[in-house]
Amino acid sequence: MKPAFARAVLSSLAAAALFVSPMGASEPGLAIVGAMVFDGTGAAPVVETVLIVDGRITAVGPKIAIPKGYRTIEARGEALLPGFFDLHTHWTASGSPATTPIIANADLAAGVTTVNDFNAAPESYEARRAWLATLVAPHVNLCGRLSTPGGHGADWADTATTKMVSTPAGARAGVDSIVAYHADCLGEVMTDGWRYGTAPDMTSMNEDALTALVDEAHKNHIPVLTHTVTVTKGAEAGRAKVDVIAHALQDRDIDDATVAAIKAGGSALAPTLAVYEPDKPGHNSSFPPSDPRHAQAMRKFKYALDNTLKLYSAGVPIALGTDGGMPATLHGKAALREMELLVQAGLPASAALVAGTANSARAMGELADRGTIEVGKRADFVLIQGKPWENIADVEKTDRVFVDGKLLFGPGAPPANADLPMPAVKVAALVDDFERTDGRSNLNTLVVTNPDGGLDRTTEILQVVPREGGHALMMTAKMAAKDNATASVVLPLTKGSVAPADLTGYHGVRFELRGDGAYRVSLKGLKGTWSSAPVAGDDGWKSVEVPFASLKPVGEKNAAAVWGGDDLTEIEIVDHRAAGAASWVEIDNVTLY
């Protein structure tokens, strides 16, 4: 058993001990009767009754008496399976669906009851967990991200979202900084930066740094999931003993030595075939067949399929991940497509179902808690109108979905989530006077940078510096070699910029500034971004007031937006300079008035 598994095993055994008898249960028991049960253990499907009390399975068998007072769900002619996993998703506003409540709806509608989200900054975990607890939702594991400077994943995020590491010592420090936020896993750890031959390759993590990273994570009982798309890096990931290798290895045919390294390391493979499928059902291909890139995509996808089958045949566990939230890779539906593609790769349908259930639970260290239909485990189920172990396409025929024994999708389920954000919160007037010594604002939020994205990025450094009577924040930047290079300081109004702030009681923002040119003040909201006219900075301190009434919407899509003031998430001081230029700005006493 890997160290990452210990936490889930111990907590599950303790929980299972509470359910040896339905006596004293806080809610009526539930009986699912007559379904053909595919329990995920490798046993053949059989008609059984399943009893649930307080969200846990208390009995499974063909001849079980249903205790008095239990609710009964008649499921004859249907298949009952453990809820599906998706170990690789991005709950991002650029995906489809695009918002947290609707993503949760989409996952449940597909029978997905546990997901890993790789898109959230650790700073947002507390607020996101609180929000998810109010929604009809699957279990969501929030996963930290680590890459290398200039590596994949470091081309868009701030350094608080994607930790950038180069050495074993840096890798351990990066893990520890994420552990402080009670991360559920580390996923996407970016082990290679192959850009598929369509763009310059990015930096890759050395094996010694990856090995130290995995060791530090396992000391903290946290599983590690990588971004690995080449055979060479797949071997390194196996030797480092990562828990899950994602994505498919697709640059060449896998060799026996790499298969052996992955198998010896105890790693599972989540090939995310759904994101790489060149011609996705219902979606136009990214490239027409006449484009050479289409032929390249087809060639890579064949490597992905063939290498997945070779690893499966060698005994490497196959798990389920999709990269849901990426282009044309729909949350929920992609998980079902992934199982179909595993069968296309050559796996038996039953093995594809085990990949989506028990194998994924095992890879996450959660098998003692969920992933199979066994006594003591969490009652996460999907009822399907068909026999997907015979015809994998039947996974599309979702009837009802249960999480913790509660019916959340299907006839009799509560209404799906409305597409609403977290409720807006009032915030204090003083945003930041930069007198705290822990890098946090007076609103207890983490101040971060937001440079331009891409392979060549502007470099920013934030530091608190002395000034007469106290301290100020200084940002220095070296602009990237690109048009409209950008640096900025971001002051979140709420932790992780998840809950919106209601600023309707204020008229504007005031702060003190000095710098080397013109800046803009932007306020970001859930419905768009509003920006000020240029604000000039020079060597002397000046007081700046930006009335909200003077702000203009940014971008064509936001042109018709009406300022409401009740859905704001961040204040940003933005610096545009010439390519390659150096820049600096100091700000202090940021206040709403």
Image: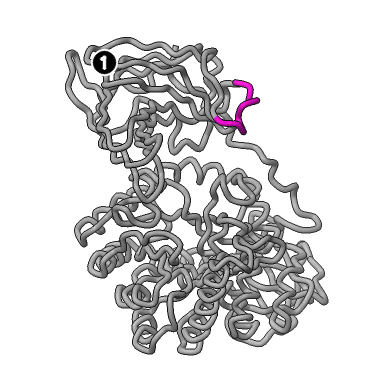
Instruction: Determine the residue positioned at 66% across, 87% down.
Output: 44
Q: Which residue is mark 1?
A: 538
Image spot of residue 271 (x, y percent): 51, 72
For the N terminus, the quadrant is: bottom left
Q: Is residue 330 above or below residue 338?
A: above
**Badge 1 amino acid:** Asp
Q: Quadrant of residue 383?
A: bottom right
Q: Is residue 27 above or below residue 83?
A: above
For the C terminus, the quadrant is: top left
Q: Give yes or no for residue 572 being in the magenta stretch.
A: no
What's the magenta region? 555-563
Between 22 and 505, the one nearer to me in the picture: 505
Q: Give yes or no for residue 561 being in the magenta stretch.
A: yes
Instruction: Determine the residue positioned at 58% across, 36% down.
Output: 422
Q: Is residue 288 above or below residue 156?
A: below
Image spot of residue 409 (x, y percent): 73, 57
* Colour convention: one colour
In-image side of 13 versus 31 (left or right) = left
Q: Is residue 144 above or below residue 134?
A: below
Q: Which SS class for mark 1? A: loop
